[in-house]
Image (cartoon, grey):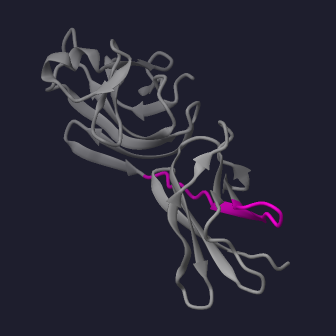
Amino acid sequence: MASEIQFDHTTGRTCYVQVRNSVGQIWNTVGAAFEAYQTANVGDYDIPAAEQGTASGLYTASVPVIPAGVYGIVAKDRAGGSPVETDLTVGAGEIEWSGTAIISSASVIVGAGGINEAAFHADTAKYQAKVWMFDDDTGAADRYVACFFRNGEPVTAGITGPTIQVIKVADGSDLVSTVAMVQIASTGMYRYNEGANRVLDGVAYIARVQATIGGNVRTWNQPVGRDS
């Protein structure tokens, strides 16, 4: 992981970036953990940025070792010998982080006189989900398995809050009310076993799975049943 964060600014400056998580905590480079912002620790929140070449005005910094998720990034111009709260913000934005690389980003470039250029890099990826239902004729449970995809490739990290709901097509009532799914080891695939409210022959159902992926709650519907 190196130089994933990039921004333009006046050449020859000493710059750094700060990283915040979805609940407003800021990355402490000394403690190597997110924490509630404290003025006394402002000097521990800076991740150094280096200018490329000799006078390019292009600065890069590396994302620290953090879990997959969506993070806010602020780029600063350090005025003195160490970071202070009044340092000028020269860039701000958001990244979607896979755990090893940036998936997508949105950014605004800020100059000394305010915003002078805006750049938006939208996440145009297509997300999908596949649900399998295994009805156990000789056992005591229906087994549901879900796998999530981004542009046709399995998503194995950055998935939170996966749930499943099974709806009866006949009247829209629940066969299985919304319930959490459990990850299968660390595969990024999820399962749920239902022993009480099982599917019946000759009846149609919709499996609705939902999860937060890439910073957004996403929902998919798929027909399931015993009849092939």
> Quick check: 222 above or below 35?
below
- In reply to whether residue 122 is colored magenta, the answer given is yes
Q: Residue at x 61, y 71 (%)?
A: 197
Residue 67 picture location, percent across and down: 49, 32
**Relative side of 178 to 190, left or right:** left
- Outermost residue on the bottom side: it is 170
- In reply to whether residue 186 is colored magenta, the answer given is no
Q: Write down the quadrant of residue 21 in the picture.
A: top left
Residue 3 picture location, percent across and down: 52, 25
Q: Write down the quadrant of residue 88 in the picture.
A: top left
Q: Residue at x 82, y 80 (%)?
A: 227
**Residue 212: in sight, yes or no?**
no
Residue 99 picture location, percent across and down: 55, 32
**What's the magenta region?**
120-143
Q: Closest to the observer: 135 or 1? A: 135
Residue 33 picture location, percent across and down: 36, 22
Q: Write down the quadrant of residue 72 in the picture.
A: top left
Q: Residue at x 65, y 36 (%)?
A: 186
**The N terminus - image quarter:** top right
